[in-house]
Amino acid sequence: MIFETHAHYDDEAFDQDREELLNSLRDAGIGTVINVCAEVSGWDRTVALTEKYPFVYGAVGVHPDDVGSLNEEAMERMRDLCRREKILAVGEIGLDYYWDKENHETQIYWLERQLDVAREEKLPVIIHSRDAARDTLETMKRKRAGEIGGVLHCFSYGKEMAREYLDMGFYLGIGGVVTFKNGKKLKEVVEYAPLERLLLETDSPYLAPVPNRGKRNSSLNLPYVAEEIARIKQVDTETVVRVTEENARKLFGI
Ligand code: NI
């Protein structure tokens, strides 16, 4: 079954129909979901989702847009949450120079601190990197992130950068953008990278694939992403679903 490696079901975009939607996933072939935190206020909501739904797991971390509010006390709490059985990763963490909400030094500092927590708690990381290719790669290398392992979520760079992360042992998260007409760069990356190193993700409620581009996204749209990867790799969709599920189970240890 499809393994959704990146969704934000604690987002208010799902307040109207969260339960109904989550309960409909298994019948639609979505077997497992990782709910990824973006901010400290999402940690408890994510834990609650993992307690309510057997197939929902969690990742705890703070997105680069929100690291301005972080402190060491929060890091301690994060560490405690990492020890919960259904928390599988630290994320999403990284650098975002597109929205540029926090200065670069602050973003890099908290990326490093959260990488430290992941290393100490022996969890993989879910990395967000937008318009920050060089600093992300330098930070990851400096912190020897290859020893920690993880995924570059919503991968948005080209083949050269993909090779750097593949060499580091990282996976690439592929979502709706691969179906976009202007998603040529990502299609090339998917063609280039081994299927054994790709993960399916939506980043719901954002980035819905064609034919639902622009609408609220949910894991129900993942078959469109799997179909496009299958077309590019010239394999059948079931193979994409099966291999990416195996990849996710291996990375996240379930
Ligand atoms: Ni996300």
Image: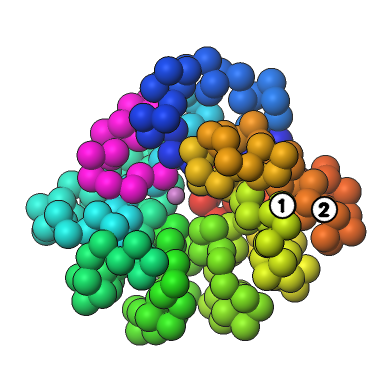
**44, above or below 245, in the image:** above
Badge 1: how crowded within 10 Å, few (<14), some, or many (20+)?
many
Is 205 left or right of 227, judged from the image as shown?
A: left
Instruction: Tell me the residue at 53%/34% (across/down).
Output: 216
Q: Is residue 175 magenta?
A: no
**52, above or below 87, in the image:** above
In front of the other: 53 or 95: 95
Instruction: Tell me the residue at 88%/48% (across/down).
Output: 236
**117, above or below 34, in the image:** below
Helix or strand or loop: what does disc 1 sit on? helix
The percent position of residue 1, horizontal first and vertical second, equals 71, 36
The magenta region covers 36-51
The percent position of residue 54, horizontal first and vertical second, equals 49, 25
The percent position of residue 102, horizontal first and vertical second, equals 23, 65
| For marks 2 and 1 on the same chain, the one whose residue lies earlier in the sequence | 1
Q: Which residue is mark 1?
A: 179
Instruction: Tell me the residue at 38%/54% (across/down).
Output: 91
Is 77 left or right of 196, judged from the image as shown?
A: left
Which disc is residue 221 wearing?
A: none
Task: Name the magenta segment's main secondary structure.
Answer: helix
The percent position of residue 57, horizontal first and vertical second, equals 45, 37
Say how the picture is coloured.
rainbow
Number of numbered discs: 2
Q: Amino acid at mark 2?
A: Ala
The reply to whether residue 124 is in sight is no
Q: Amino acid at mark 1?
A: Thr
**Quadrant in the rendering for residue 4:** top right
Which disc is residue 230 wearing?
A: 2
Helix or strand or loop: what does disc 2 sit on? helix
